[in-house]
Image (spheres, grey):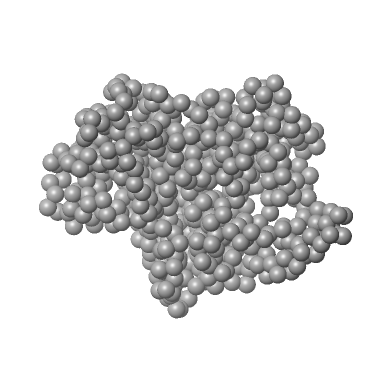
Amino acid sequence: MCGICGFVSRRQISLEQLKQMNDTMVHRGPNDSGEEIFAGRDGYGVGMAQRRLSILDLSVLGHQPMHSCDDRLVIAYNGEIYNFLELRQALSDYPFKSKCDTEVILAAYLKWGISCVERFQGMFAIALYDREKGELYLVRDRIGKKPLYYWQDGDNLVFASELKPIMACPGFPKKIRRDVLKRFLYQQCINEPDAVFEHVYKVEPGQMMRFRSGKLSKHKYWDIAKVYHAKKQQAVGSYQEAKEELKAILKDAVSKRLIADVPVGAFLSGGYDSSLVTAIAQEVSSEPVKTYSIGFNEERYNEAKYAKEVAAHLGTQHTELYIDERAMFDMVASIPQYYDEPFADSSQIPSMLVAGLAAKDVTVVLSGDGGDEFFCGYNIYDNVAQAQKLDVLGRMTYRVCQMPPFRKTGLFDKLPFKVQVVAGNHDIQTKTQLGGRTYIKVIDQMLPDGGVPFKYPIESRYHEPDWQARRMLLDEETYLPGDILCKVDRATMKYSIEARCPILDVNVMEYSYRLPHAYKYANGVKKRILKDIAYDYIPKELLNRPKVGFGVPLDSWLRGPLREELQDMCSVDYLKKQGIFHAQYVHDFISEYVRTGDQGPASGANYSKVAWSFFVFQQWYRGYI
């Protein structure tokens, strides 16, 4: 685990400048750093750099940039290849010097070419330069666990794990890409392949890129829609068979993620996913697993008591920390430093707090991320199933509202909010992305320009008639990498620890596609098969309760201790000088929000999320622009 950056450029970038770029990510790798510049083909200079968080082979033999034995290849790499020991056996003719997985990547490329990445099981962002071919490869893992940005400036390319090194690169213009801002305010993140700056992009999950002589080509080696349909043809017939096979695959995934030369622990919220991962880790580990959870004094947010009961049942070495609102609030100022692109999922705050707790003892933590997306766990999936049943009725209602006599009276706007959601849902490309009409109206007026659509107009590519299954695929491709995995990566890297997600093992993900949907959702029971596996380890009464997320009191913060700062950010003079937002409208909207606050879920006017997204953007803007 670490941070990487570098370039292939005809511009003059010195070793000292490369080092300055690299050192912006010291939190990602405090144990070691390496920078190197050498001549490439066609007059290009090549720079490779890495900040190292030592996990495997803590010796100097794991130093990067690393060269292949014949000096043909140079690599800067962030992540873990969990099946590196098996690959190493298949590459026994290579003269290995280290015991780390980085060298296995070099050996694999020399034997199998760049298609070697299809053999890797793990999380990774790889920059590999082939001197013989004059080619730079940028590769990202299948689901997007590890981040990788790139800036293409004419026939020059700069890459990095975060935006900070790119911002520190000589000549970078920091020109904001305004067409993504409406979607950011709506989705609270900027999803792949987009980024907040012009000509900067993210390598997509499951994508490899080749840069040669100023030309960039792209290839998807793992595409969710294609893999889903291929695996769906191999459906598992028996539920009991599926349960036993999935359990064995999860055990293998957890076991591989316990391999490290540093202490390993687990995040334990007390929910199904983290509890199951912890239970399996406790089963296969030779010693009690260290587990970590944070508690809240406000009862409706607090899951720590459940985590403690699960930990006691499993016999883990458990640590919990109760935090108050002040501890969460104190994290707000650090958001731009570690989330160096606007990111407004407020659960980033408690995520940073639990990461800080674990970092006192361990360098690696297991998490339960991926269970909701791959096994149908979110509450939105209930709503999606209901919306599909009501779709025909909703379309009829919309047509009636559009008839001249009813349109004149504004009948549609007088309908209950939930009826509006169903009746207004007529875009075939976004059928499962319910609601948001009131948010969209407000955000549309906050920004003068058009831009990318608020929602992701890509649902037809899944060719999936079941709305729940389709929404899960959409979340796997957008919300999971763009929000959840970004949040966890930055939160853990803030404290220089590595998060590993067994449920996002490629074998688990692909096996989930072989399961009939009824194995995941049946009679209103979400994550059916994961829950049944969890019950093999943990009594049902310890787990069976409503889902609770990390809660942050945004409304009371924005209208309380952050009120003055928020109002400064939306002053008409400031906004006019900034030149991004509709100054008067934003000033009036924020002023009214501060005065009245959220209007309750039934109205759809829960404007704290929009106000928070605006606040986070302005906080980022002040920090970097």
Is residue 154 rendered to the left or right of residue 558?
A: left
Residue 20 % position (x, y): 36, 23
Residue at image coords 79%, 44%: 599
Q: Is residue 469 above or below residue 346?
A: below
**Residue 55 appears in the figure:** no
Q: Is residue 424 above or below residue 4?
A: below
Q: Quadrant of residue 411?
A: bottom right
Q: Residue furthest front?
A: 404
Q: Quadrant of residue 610?
A: top right
- Count numbered badges in the picture: 0
Residue at image coords 25%, 31%: 44
Which residue is more in the foreground, 156 or 276?
156
Residue 133 % position (x, y): 20, 43
Residue 171 % position (x, y): 40, 24
Quadrant (top left, top right, bottom left, bottom right) of the N terminus? top left
Which residue is more in the foreground, 550 or 36?
36
Residue at image coords 35%, 28%: 22
